[in-house]
Amino acid sequence: MDTLAAEYELALSLKEFTQDQATTDPMDADARLSGEINNLRCTLDTLTLDTQILQAEASGWYHMGENTLDMDISLAAEDLDAATRAFGLFPVTGELTAAVHAAGSATAPDITAALAGKDLGAAGIILDLVDVEAKLGSTGWADISRFRVQGKEMQSGGFRHSPHF
């Protein structure tokens, strides 16, 4: 029996790619991308996506051979109602920002996340402020270092909650 073997080297570089159409449709976007693929490592120098409803930025790297990564992602939506409707999701109102860092094994990375929201509303519940910071380790345990929720009068299913936690 013969064995077939091959070696290859892949190099791709994309610098300052842009696409500008965000003024015509909420799903159109201004996008900027800079990064490269070299051997088995994909590096994302910058990815910026700006739509009428959502802004996102990302950077980092992923190694295909080792299945490891180190990525930063941030999102901001000033009008969640428009964002959730555009993607066909359950309607939510308010403003939301999020920042996520993931590093380590791609199958079980260590994740640090921060989430902040203002005037959030869904299913009759309205929150003036949400502020959460947490870490999720590769073992599956979460460490919540900050959890703050404020609302004038939070009600759900007949239960009344304290407006400050």
Image (cartoon, rainbow, N blue to C red):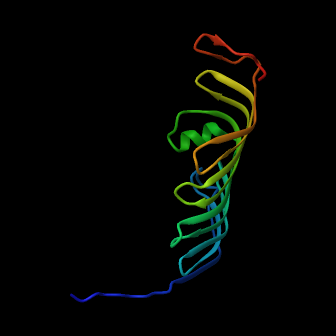
Q: Which residue lies most toward the top here?
A: 158
Residue at (55%, 60%) from the top-left corner?
106
| Residue 56, image x, y percentages | 66, 55
Task: Report the front residue among 128 and 66.
Answer: 66
In the figure, 128 relative to 95: above or below? above
Asked if residue 15 lies left or right of residue 105, the reply is right
Foreground residue, 70 or 25?
A: 70
Q: Nearer the viewer, residue 50 or 42?
A: 42
- Is 2 placed above or below 122 here? below
Task: State left or right for residue 28 relative to residue 150.
Answer: left
- The image shows residue 17 at horizontal and vertical percentages of 63, 73
Image spot of residue 14 (x, y percent): 61, 78
* Rendered residue at 52%/38% (across/down): 89
On the image, the x and y values in percent for residue 5 come to 35, 87
Task: Assign the N terminus to one quadrant of the image.
Answer: bottom left
Q: Quadrant of residue 8?
A: bottom left
Classify the position of the C terminus by image quarter.
top right
Nearest to the observer: residue 119 or residue 150 = 150
Residue at 58%, 52% in the rendered image: 25
Outermost residue to the left: 1
- Which quadrant would residue 128 be assigned to in this image? top right
Q: Is residue 146 left or right of residue 135?
A: right
Q: What count of labels does the image hold?
A: 0
- Residue at coordinates 63% horizontally, 74% vertically from top-left? 35
